[in-house]
Amino acid sequence: MKFVSVRDFREKSARIWKELPDEREMVITSNGRPVAILAAVNESNLVEALSAFRTARAVEAVAELQKRALEHGDDRISMDEIQAEIKAVRMTRSR
């Protein structure tokens, strides 16, 4: 996988766009840190590529929620406590 700085992307964008289909993905960096991913797509794989990207983001979000639950001890609450919390939130929303 190729890494491209924001500066190079700005200055050499024509070359980067030309290389993208062969590279398939490139990581854009700012100050050496990744900030974006460029992925080659076309009309036939756009929907699948977007779906895969969204699935990856959802998996990342769930992992982050699980990590936070472990950090705060929320992984040990009972189903009764969960149901009570849901009920309390629903009651405040219905008002």
Image (spheres, rainbow, N blue to C red):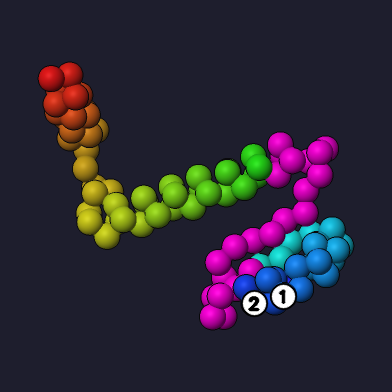
Q: Image check: 4 left or right of 60?
A: right
Confirm whether residue 35 shows in the render.
Answer: yes
The kind of secondary structure element at disc 2 is helix
Return the mark for residue 7.
2
Residue 52 image-quadrant placement: top right
Q: CA distance from mark 1 to mark 2?
A: 6 Å
The x and y percentages for residue 10 are 68, 71
Residue drawn at 22 percent across, 29 percent down: 86
Mark 1: few/some/many CA within 10 Å (<14, 14-19, 20+): few
Magenta span contains residue 64: no
Circle 1: residue type? Glu
Residue 40 counted in the magenta span = yes
Residue that numbered label 1 is attached to: 11
70 versus 30 height, above or below? above
Q: Residues within 10 Å of mark 2 (few under 14, many from 20)?
A: few
Q: Position of residue 30 (x, y in %)?
A: 56, 75
Q: Residue furthest front?
A: 11
**Residue name at image x 59 percent, y 63 percent:** 36
Q: Give the magenta part as a residue range.
A: 28-49
Q: Single out the residue that lies furthest toward the bottom.
A: 31
Q: Amino acid at mark 2?
A: Arg
Seen in the picture, residue 30 relative to 26 is either above or below; the reply is below
Q: Residue at x 27, y 60 (%)?
A: 71
Q: Verify CB contact (< 8 Å) between mark 1 and mark 2.
A: yes
Q: Where residue 26 sits: x, y (%)?
A: 71, 66
The part of the image, by quadrant, that contains residue 8 is: bottom right
Say which element carries label 1.
helix
Q: Where is the C terminus found, in terms of image quarters?
A: top left
Foreground of the two, 16 or 50:
16
Could you tell me if residue 23 is visible in this image? no
31 horizontally vs 85: left or right: right
